[in-house]
Image (spheres, helix red, strand yellow):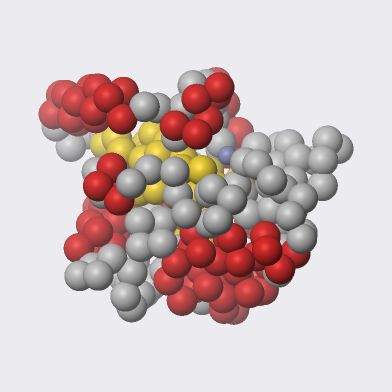
Amino acid sequence: MPAGSSSQYQYFGVADHSKSAHYARGLLPEEIEEQHEEIDKLNRRYDGAFKIFKGIESDILADGSLDYPDEILARFDFVVASVHSRLRLPRGEQTERILRAVSNPFTTILGHMTGRQLLRRPGADVDVEQILAACARHGVAVEINANPWRLDLDWRSHRRALELGCLMSIDPDAHSTDEIDLVHWGVKMARKGGVPPIKVLSCWDVRTLGRWLSARKRRPERGAGTVRRDRAA
Ligand SMILES: [Zn+2]
């Protein structure tokens, strides 16, 4: 989740892969601690001039649960929940699995909803409408994945997402610092989809986003009720 103004970022969200993806250098709990210490150190040094948010891309397991226990998920500023395996489950089962992840109180953003990779593999067969409605209900932002292999959620569904009350998040899915610039593809796709910046978390200024993320964390039952989505307006 990198973001800020188009010309200069005010903040950056780190979201490494989680432990299920250790093959993709997913983080083990002790590595998370180390990363967080480093982030705290940098944030102190930046002294408000720039901010790093602590995130993770947590795998959605086969049953829809996330692959870290709650006490670890609670340490992050934001959690991107994503499907990376078992993309061929039947529609009903796949949809249920994602709905469960969306209803997880620690989920902040639903990453690349269908898991498609353009020209490589089709996405999972899911009930997009039902998932979008759940995202709106639980205050989970829908990712507009800017990686040109993904461009997922597809622009054709953006308007519907907005109608249902979803917020979006344009993320580059960067696996190296070079790839942060991929975010521009997401911006273009969001424009094509008719998404205004105010509906995109990653277009908000650092204070608004920080307040929104903390408000989500403070929710008493972590998930009961939704956060006021006009907070940023
Ligand atoms: Zn991913």
In the rendered view, does 126 fall on the left or right side of 197?
A: right
Q: x and y percent of residue 190 in the render?
A: 63, 56
Q: Quadrant of residue 48?
A: top left
Compared across the picture, whether 82 is left or right of 216 comes to: right
- Determine if residue 75 is in view: yes
Residue 114 picture location, percent across and down = 69, 53
**Residue occupying the point 53% across, 49% down:** 60
Q: Position of residue 34 (x, y in %)?
A: 24, 22
The image shows residue 27 at horizontal and vertical percentages of 40, 27
* Residue shown at the point (77%, 60%) measured from the top left: 90
The quadrant where residue 233 appears: bottom left
Residue at the spot 56% in from the left edge and 37% down from the top edge: 172
* Drawn side of residue 147 relative to residue 101, left or right: right
Q: Is residue 8 visible?
A: no
> Does 145 sit above or below residue 209?
above
Q: Nearer the viewer, residue 176 or 60?
A: 60
> Which residue is situated farthest in the front direction here?
63
Of 186 and 161, nearer the camera is 161
Q: Quadrant of ligand 1?
A: top right
Instruction: Give the camera-side residue of 66 and 209.
Output: 66
